[in-house]
Image (cartoon, helix red, strand yellow):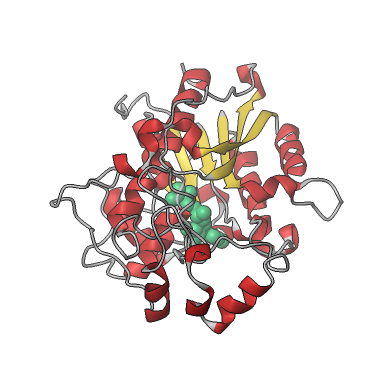
Amino acid sequence: MIANEKSAPRLVSLFSGCGGMDKGFEQAGFQRVWANDFDKDAQAVFRLNFGEIDGRDIREVPVDEIPACDILTAGFPCQPFSNAGNRRGVYDSRGELYLECLRIIERKLPKAVLFENVKGLISSKHQSGQYLIEVIKGDLEKLGYAVNYRVVNASDYGVPQNRERLILVAFRNDLGKRFEFPPVQLNKENLTLRHILDIPEDVPNQVYWPYSPQAQSMVEKIPQGGSWKNIPYEDLSPRFKRIRDDMKRYHAPNFYRRFSLDEINGTITASAQPENCGITHPIHNRRYTIREIARIQTFPDDFKFIDDTTKNIVAMYKVIGNAVPCHLAKVIGDAIMEQAFK
Ligand SMILES: C[S@@+](CC[C@H](N)C(=O)[O-])C[C@H]1O[C@@H](n2cnc3c(N)ncnc32)[C@H](O)[C@@H]1O
């Protein structure tokens, strides 16, 4: 559905990043009336593709300056909740950014709210000892919403990437229903790398961030479908030898995963480091290009990342890795449109 300026539900987008979630909601027929992110790189990419974005820290934005909306989306920062990071949870001030969402929801009372976050949020505890997700659910219920949440794997919804994320959808009580998650896709054959890495030459942004000499020499010894475990012990650096010597202590890390053409890629992370995500091309001994990770994140090929205003290639990996896959957002957006706005 193409957004109809007059009747399309109005969307306020918080923590918009470069606009992965916004792209999907646009495809689902929502009309964005306001977006916000304080990261300069994210803003530059957002402007290239969508136009204006408010660049202030959300904590400094008076609620009166935010327009009325029918839906509010927010993928508040993941780090405090990430399983990979420390477990300070809400003790980290960034963990309280969801309170900013509540401050705005309380005043705007949109029909629907969508929160997106890392899977780790589900097991994070609040100071009170309660699970944080239950605290968030309770807060929304107090504001008059019916809440449903679930950890979803993006590949269950047609995204060529195994990426687990928490999705929470709240419907205002007067709708008289709770959001129902759409059915999952069982046949994932078309999601393997073979189906997405064949990119026509004229598609822009086919550039990559080279590996350090040490990473490059490791990558060259790893077959497709393998990882650092395929590298002979004697070829490892002293640091990696230490880890190999005591795998239990280091929780048997799966560094330098290199997915094969017949696999679905793992989660693309903002740091784009081979130590923490599958970021090496199956056949070529290099990091994925900007366009390749954009495809794994289901950005359309006409979505622009690099031009004269956004030359920082490392920042492009960051904003793409931070994004909600556009197609996941579209599938959830379609379901919200169907259930809350028709
Ligand atoms: C996980 S990313 C969101 C990605 C986005 N949902 C997408 O699909 O592309 C979180 C974003 O929150 C932004 N952010 C963090 N703290 C913020 C704050 N206090 N005010 C405004 N933006 C903030 C970061 O700059 C980052 O781009």
Q: Position of residue 287 (x, y in %)?
A: 35, 64
**Residue pushed farthest left?**
202
Quadrant into which the N terminus falls: top left
**Residue pushed farthest right?**
128
Pick the front one: 108 or 40: 40
Pick the front one: 313 or 263: 263
Q: Position of residue 225 (x, y in %)?
A: 43, 52
- The residue at the point 23 percent across, 46 percent down is 198
User: Going by the image, does 163 lie left or right of 327?
Assistant: right
- Seen in the picture, residue 122 relative to 285 is either above or below; the reply is above
Q: Number of marks in the image?
A: 0
Pick the front one: 147 or 303: 303
Q: Position of residue 264 (x, y in %)?
A: 43, 43
- The residue at the point 48 percent across, 49 percent down is 266
User: Going by the image, does 28 lie left or right of 241?
Assistant: left
- The residue at the point 72 percent across, 58 percent down is 89
Quarter of image, res 310? bottom left
**Residue pushed farthest bottom?**
238
- Seen in the picture, residue 30 relative to 98 is either above or below; the reply is above
Quarter of image, res 192? top left
User: Going by the image, does 137 lie left or right of 74?
Assistant: right
- The residue at the point 49 percent across, 59 percent down is 277
Instruction: For residue 110, say whether it is visible.
Output: no
Q: Position of residue 23 (x, y in %)?
A: 36, 41
Instruction: For residue 20, say whether it is visible.
Output: yes
